[in-house]
């Protein structure tokens, strides 16, 4: 019995040691990466200066044409992340400030994403390789129910989110395989989709007094950043478009541009404009705020 217990303890210690080594190795690869995604691009950088930083979900990523801002002499990057919520947008801004970025203006897409305060596991997992190295990331996740497992258990985060930050992604990072996420200054153009469903129903969505939107407002105020919060267009055949009116009742400072671009020819899907629509929309924003 004694020998069995000793053997079991040795196996457990060996397993723990292997997990620690794997955790260190995976994290080291991510710490040397800066061209796979927007989170790594920010984390492995220092003290960039921007006239305009764009934050939000895919409705920011696909709707604000960053090169058009640059053509106006405004140093700009679109940090919108498809699938992301305000949880991730707030954290990315915190990470930029931790990296000593100087930012004059933040354009924040704040519309459908105001309806929840949850994190998106797929997007937020890309912050996790840096959770031991960044105070901003550690604190932001500290209020999550699974924080202790993510922070204290070696290699746990890489196992749980293997499809996002596990072996395949590590391999792609290690061989420096490029992505399109950083092309066009972060803007991701969509084409016309002839089979797109140009109908949507957002009747059940309700905007919240969102704590992560409040965080972004406070961060901008504390760092002398002008915050421009914008609701972006949706296709005409959407049920429940009074959601946008509810947002403005809750947050009068959010600019309602939901009807700024109309017509299915400008949309790739009901909630996302194609490149033509995005250029038209960006032109309106530039004229209204940066003329």
Image: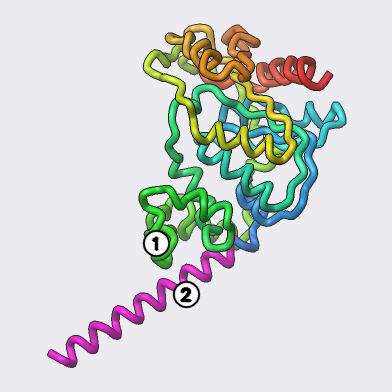
Relative vertical location of residue 142 with respect to residue 16 in this rendering, above or below: above
Q: Nearer the viewer, residue 223 or 158?
A: 223
Residue range of the region highlighted in magenta in the rendering: 1-30
* Residue occupied by mark 2: 21
Q: Nearer the viewer, residue 21 or 194?
A: 21
Question: Is residue 161 left or right of 226 when viewed as pictured?
Answer: left
Q: What's the distance in space between the residues labelled 1 and 2, CA to CA?
A: 12 Å
* Residue occupied by mark 1: 156
Furthest residue in direction bottom, as rendered? 3
Q: Position of residue 199 (x, y in %)?
A: 45, 12
Query: On the rendered image, what quadrant is the C terminus found in?
Result: top right
Q: Position of residue 125 (x, y in %)?
A: 48, 49
What residue lies at 23% left-to-right and 83% top-to-bottom?
8
Q: Is residue 2 magenta?
A: yes
- Can residue 281 be seen here? The reply is yes
- What element does badge 1 sit on? helix
Relative vertical location of residue 3 with respect to residue 79 in this rendering, above or below: below
């Amino acid at each position: 019995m004694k020998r069995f217990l000793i053997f079991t303890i040795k196996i457990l210690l060996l397993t723990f040691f292997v997990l620690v080594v794997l955790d260190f190795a995976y994290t080291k690869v991510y710490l040397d990466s800066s061209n796979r995604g927007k989170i790594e691009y920010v984390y492995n950088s220092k003290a960039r200066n921007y006239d305009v930083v764009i934050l939000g979900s895919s409705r920011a990523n696909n709707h604000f044409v960053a090169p058009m801002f640059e053509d106006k002499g405004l140093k700009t990057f679109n940090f919108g992340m498809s699938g992301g919520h305000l949880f991730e947008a707030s954290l990315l801004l915190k990470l930029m400030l931790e990296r000593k970025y100087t930012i004059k203006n933040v354009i924040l897409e704040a519309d459908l994403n105001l309806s929840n305060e949850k994190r998106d596991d797929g997007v937020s997992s890309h912050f996790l390789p840096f959770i031991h190295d960044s105070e901003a990331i550690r604190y932001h996740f500290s209020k999550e129910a699974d924080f202790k497992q993510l922070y204290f258990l070696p290699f746990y985060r890489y196992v749980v989110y293997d499809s996002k930050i596990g072996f395949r992604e590590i391999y792609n990072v290690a061989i420096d395989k490029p992505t399109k996420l950083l092309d066009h200054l972060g803007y991701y153009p969509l084409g016309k989709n002839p089979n797109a469903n140009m109908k949507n129903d957002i009747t059940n969505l309700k905007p919240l007094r969102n704590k992560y939107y409040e965080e972004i407002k406070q961060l901008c105020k504390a760092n002398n950043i002008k915050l421009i919060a914008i609701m972006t267009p949706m296709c005409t055949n959407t049920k429940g478009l009074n959601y946008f009116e509810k947002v403005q009742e809750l947050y009068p400072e959010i600019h309602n541009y939901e009807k700024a671009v109309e017509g299915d020819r400008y949309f790739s899907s009901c909630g996302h404009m194609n490149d033509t629509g995005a250029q038209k929309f960006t032109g309106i924003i530039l004229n209204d705020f940066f003329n």
